Amino acid sequence: MAKYGANSLRAKTITNSIANFIIKDLRPYRIVESKEFKDMLKTLDSRYTVPGRKTFSYKIIPDKYREVKQEVIASLSKAEQVALTSDGWTSRATQSYVTITSTHISQNLELVNYVLQTRSMPESHTGENIADCLQQALKEWNIPDSPLYLVSDNAANMKKAGQLLECDLHLGCYAHTLNLAAQKALGVKAVSNILARVRRASILKSQAKLFELNYTRLIIDVCTRWNSAYDMLQRYLLMQVSVVAALMNKDLKHKDKELKVLSDDETHLAECVVETLKPLKAVTTTLCSEKTPTLSIILPLHRKLLDSYLTPAEGDLPSIVSMKALIANDLKTRYTDEQQYNMLLKATALDPRFKTLPFLSENDRFEVFNKIVQDVSVMNEKPVSVKTEPVDETTRQLPELPSLPLPAPPNDTDYHNEIIKVTDSEEAVATAPHSKKPKTDESLTLNELLGDVYVTKVEPPKSKLQRAELEVSLYKECPGIPLTSNPLLWWAENEHSFPLLSRLAKHILCIPGTSVPSERVFSSTGDIVSAQRANLKPRHVDMLIFLKKNMKT
């Protein structure tokens, strides 16, 4: 039976399917040359010949990359505003990378996230080098550099990069901010001792099979992630009965005498630590959304943490009081920059869930919306479709109505100076002084017939500032929406009523509250740059991550 030609429709279809399998399932290129893979394809369709590894890595995958890249650039070009996030990481082969992601709100008011690039950066990750990398990305993806919004961790090199780029807003990732504050709290001596004891118990992971213990998954924390300590404690407390039984095993007890169960007081402290960190864990989880705006929820959550969850309560253990104080004091130092704080306030106000700004005074709320009016009034005008409806039937004004055509007047120079008056009496019909015959009904104008009933005055057009003030005023009067609602859906449904304000919402609400989009790439890279593919070239790493995250199935 004859083999398919390389350019036949059937061969192209199968080859494309294999490429998608490699991309989406993060398979190594060499899989196409394995005997088992070839045998499987031969069983499915013996007429198909699978291309080699180099064909996929140097032709098929790069072609897909170029195709999807153009789609991404086209999508970005339609955005009102694009915000960037950036973070660095190191592969198994100790190769340093910088990942850059973008976020914008589409024309139909949906949040769109792209992983733009994951580029090798062998040179030192200084602020200057990172700034150069970001500047090159702006050019490559045709993203305007003004206004420039960047979200990253709070590292000094990233702050320096933001300064060099003259970002209109450089925001520190709020999840990273919480991490820094929580790490200080975990340093409280009594708490760190508890963590050390629980961490020691985690060696059961390696010894459970050896001693045939009934072992269920424990978790070991990671020093750079506070939430992993929370997860470790929570899991330990959940499994405490099983852990105690395992620690009492004589073989294990003999092997490591330092393994001891927690006392009642220590267990109580561990429970209190978990309860104290629980709101921070919830906040971090909430901020990880890539479907709804997150910048607008930072201040409401920030204020709730400081005013409620981190306030010492009656009966708190001394260690818990210290934990809360350390976290609160660290958070109070954040967002002291006026530019950052004002942007957070405007984002919160433009989210219909939080637009009442209950944590501000009345004067401060007025100032926030006044700044929004100013921002709207200076935005570049774009054609918008405005649908207006009368507010009050009694004061409704109609546009000027057209008049019926007038017959040609007689050749009399004084004719145009006379006014034809119509009364309810047929006998009082007046004619022009020099007219040979009275005016007929056909010569009456619509204004003369209906002018005493309908208002025909046309108001002068409002300035942009006046329209902005009106939109903001109406927006403030609108009822709020539930906290579980998507604010972008509200804006999509009300865009026609607030054409100017909705544009500002697209500009600001696209900014993510965290650099999670960049950090999430790390989980993919763990599969792509695996131990078996540690020597994968950086350009292939970039293409595979890009396609994995952006290619539509």
Image (cartoon, grey):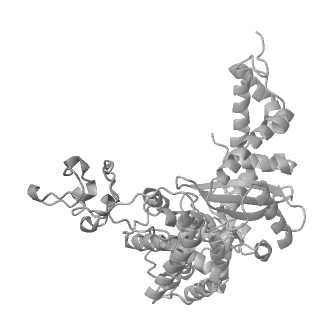
How far across and how far down the image is residue 128, in percent? 85, 71
The N terminus sits in image quarter: top right
Q: Residue drawn 42% across and 70% down?
A: 475
Query: On the rendered structure, is 435 left or right of 154?
Result: left
How far across and how far down the image is residue 405, in percent? 32, 48
Q: 376 or 487, which lies in front?
A: 376
The image quarter containing residue 523 is bottom right
The image quarter containing residue 111 is bottom right
Q: 302 or 279, which lies in front?
A: 302
Query: On the rendered structure, is 433 left or right of 423?
Result: right
Against 33, residue 202 (above or below) is below
Label tally: 0
Q: Residue drawn 24% across and 67% down?
A: 394
Residue 271 appears in view: no
Against 444, residue 354 (above or below) is below
Q: Residue furthest top?
A: 1
Q: Residue drawn 20% across and 61% down?
A: 421
Q: 146 or 111, which lies in front?
A: 146
The image quarter containing residue 553 is top right
